[in-house]
Image (cartoon, rainbow, N blue to C red):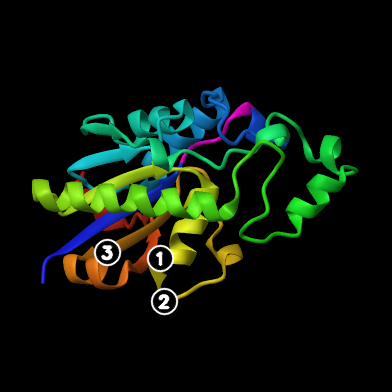
């Protein structure tokens, strides 16, 4: 049965990430350091050859796509954006640590939300919509391997909710420019709304890879 492979990758670093500031839906670009680190990773690791790139519309993701996959078609998918953090946007942990609503949110729970923000349950619903769109689009266009550039929160939510085998979300933390390969068949998705987690992406380079270049 035909399989559809998706390399799910986290965007590069921003100034806010480096300073420990929550940005969520806030649209900020990559930092100069973040862009340079991504460029270095294209030399250090092997990124897959893909037919198309699907990305969160936020600049830190589309700029990551331009660095990692400069020659591929890019489609933005609004539902791949990061969690809306409401009043916690653009604030650091130090600024929030004494707020009771922040303490309540940190404790977790699917229905818990930042004031004016989005709950985990709502994010999971739109993550499903994004996945369904991407998988259906790949099937319709006969594409068997694509990349998906999105956010750390979306990746851990996506893989823990829809991925097999099941992992604790805390074990699915991704570094900038890195992530996981997943594969899905039409039957698996339509019957179970699930995909298989294959392993890490990008891939280690070996000496023979460099000799072939």
Residue position marked by numbered label 1 in the rendering:
162
Residue 13 on the magenta span: yes
Q: Is residue 21 visible?
A: no
Q: Are marks 3 and 2 in contact (CB under 8 Å)?
A: no
Q: Earlier in the sequence, mark 1 or mark 3?
A: 1
Q: Can the viewer see residue 35 in this picture?
A: yes
Numbered marks: total: 3
Element at badge 3?
strand
Residue indicated by mark 2: 165
How packed is label 3: few (under 14 Cα within 10 Å), some, or many (20 or more)? Answer: many
Q: Earlier in the sequence, mark 3 or mark 2?
A: 2
Picture layout, residue 78 above or below residue 135: above
Figure check: 57 above or below 201: above
Residue plotted at (82% across, 51% down): 103
> According to the image, label 3 marks what residue?
183
Q: Is residue 34 left or right of residue 65?
A: right
Say which residue appears at 27% left-offset and 64% top-offset. Answer: 183
- Decide if residue 150 is on the left or right side of residue 100: left
Gap between marks 1 and 3 measured at Cα: 11 Å
Quadrant in which residue 56 is drawn:
top left
Seen at 50% across and 36% down, the residue is 12
Q: Main secondary structure of the magenta part?
A: loop
Q: What x and y, as percent, mark residue 50?
A: 21, 46
6 horizontally vs 43: left or right: left
Mark 1: secondary structure: helix
Q: Residues within 10 Å of mark 1 (few under 14, many from 20)?
A: many
Magenta span of residues: 11-15
Indicate the quadrant containing the N terminus: top left, top right, bottom left or bottom right. Answer: bottom left
**Which dot marks residue 35?**
none
Q: CA distance from mark 1 to mark 2?
A: 9 Å
Q: Residue at x 43, y 33 (%)?
A: 61
């Amino acid at each position: 049965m035909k399989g559809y492979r998706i390399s799910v990758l986290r965007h590069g670093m921003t100034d806010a990430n480096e300073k420990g500031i929550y940005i969520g839906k806030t649209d900020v670009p990559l930092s100069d350091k973040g862009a340079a680190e991504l460029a270095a990773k294209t030399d250090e690791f092997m990124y897959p050859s893909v037919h198309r790139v699907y990305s969160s519309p936020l600049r830190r993701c589309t700029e990551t796509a331009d660095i990692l996959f400069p020659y591929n078609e890019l489609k933005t998918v609004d539902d791949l954006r990061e969690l809306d953090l409401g009043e916690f946007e653009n604030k650091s942990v130090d600024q929030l640590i004494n707020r009771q609503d922040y303490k309540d949110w940190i404790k977790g729970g699917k229905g818990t939300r930042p004031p004016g923000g989005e709950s985990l349950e709502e994010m999971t619903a739109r993550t499903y919509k994004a996945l369904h769109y991407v998988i259906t689009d790949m099937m319709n266009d006969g594409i068997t391997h694509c990349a998906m550039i999105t956010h750390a929160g979306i990746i851990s939510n996506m893989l823990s909710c829809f991925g097999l085998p099941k992992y604790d979300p805390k074990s699915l933390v991704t570094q900038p420019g890195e992530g996981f390969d997943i594969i899905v068949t039409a039957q698996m998705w339509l019957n179970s709304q699930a995909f298989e987690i294959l392993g890490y992406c990008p891939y280690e380079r070996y000496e023979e890879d460099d000799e072939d270049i």
